[in-house]
Image (tube, rainbow, N blue to C red):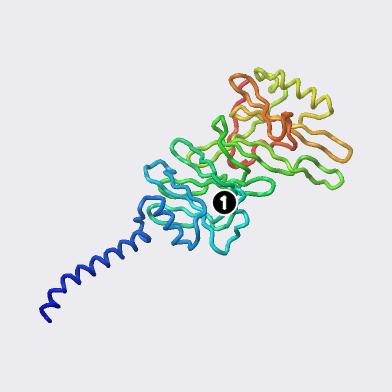
Amino acid sequence: MLKKLCQMIPIIAISVYFFCGVCLHAFAEENSGTLTDSADSYIDAVERASGGEVTYNLYYDFDGNGTNEMFALVRNSSDSHAYEDSGVMEGRLWYVNADGAIEVMSKYRRYYKDPKLMEFDGNSVLPLHQRFESGTLTYLWGVIGGKSYELNASGRINGLFVNEYGEIEGIGEAFDSFWSKENNSYSGHTYNKYYFYYEHGNIREYGGEDITWEDFCRIPGIEAVKNKIEKEKTRQGEEIASIYYRSNGIVVVNFEKEITDGRKYSNMQVRITEDGVEIGKTMGDSGFSDGRIAPAFLDELATYPETFPY
């Protein structure tokens, strides 16, 4: 009997070693930065850490270093499922890499489905467009050196995307279509375009420099726009309140008009291109929009032209 027991000791030792080795490896993989670099492994890690269900994930090499990371939205059983079939994805934002999973935005939000990555010279930014009844608010997440971070313009402007000119374009919302003399207050929900660019991992804005009407009239190819303004604005009693030039070729003209019970505001944006001048459109086809456009929507992020080139 003793002889048989002695013969079994090496087998038992090997079995214990193997079993413990597997357990330790599994523990290390989950907790010590050795996750397998795969979408399934990352999803499993998020769901284990959060106790919830991944409703959206993007497994991608965000910082261009040859290793994939993942951003994922997680929904718990106690969270609302009201928008499950309406083109909206819900959850709290998690980030995963080989070091494990971490929650980076704990607030539960609803976003439009299938956001399109913004690509900038090997760096990719995930825009999450929060859903509201009258618009969106864009949250921006990126990765530098394997670490996730929220960009400086995140959660501050409506519907950011990369336009056909390679600029980041968004809608600035305000209530500035009308000023009431009686109440000394502004009203009228307005939506106007503002322009940004990516620089060193963050966002900067194309700020607008004041120019005169005479400066404006010197822009090559501006004659048709000038005539439109005179016919549809100044001849109708509207005055030019301000003109701003941005270094991406956008020129803003703001108008105002005194009326019986207050003041109305509107604007026009034009883009200077190699082929001439284009009238920018925000809402509708007239080329004019309600409200006033500021020199910058996020002034602390803005850079301004040093000169007006015309």
Locate residue 309: give its quadrant.
top right
Residue at (66, 18) in percent of width and height: 221
Locate residue 216: give its quadrant.
top right
**How crowded is the residue under tag 1: few (<14 C-alpha within 10 Å), some, or many (20+)?**
many
Foreground residue among 58 and 166: 58
Residue at (60, 60) in percent of width and height: 80
In the drawing, does residue 134 fall left or right of residue 167? Answer: right
* 156, above or below 5, in the image: above
Q: How many marks?
A: 1
> Farthest residue toward the bottom?
1
> Farthest residue toward the left?
3
Question: What is the x, y in percent for residue 237?
Answer: 84, 28
Foreground residue among 213 and 23: 23
Locate residue 101: give its quadrant.
bottom left
Residue at (34, 59) in percent of width and height: 29
* 66, above or below 30, in the image: above
* 310, above or below 183, in the image: above
* Quadrant assignment for the N terminus: bottom left
In the drawing, does residue 258 fall left or right of residue 284? Answer: right
Secondary structure of residue under mark 1: strand
* 151, above or below 14, in the image: above
Question: What is the x, y in percent for residue 2?
Answer: 12, 81
Residue flagged by tag 1: what amino acid is it?
A: Met
Question: What is the x, y in percent for residue 229?
Answer: 76, 24
Question: What is the x, y in percent for residue 133?
Answer: 68, 49
* Quadrant assignment for the C terminus: top right
According to the image, label 1 marks what residue? 89
Foreground residue among 310 and 172: 172
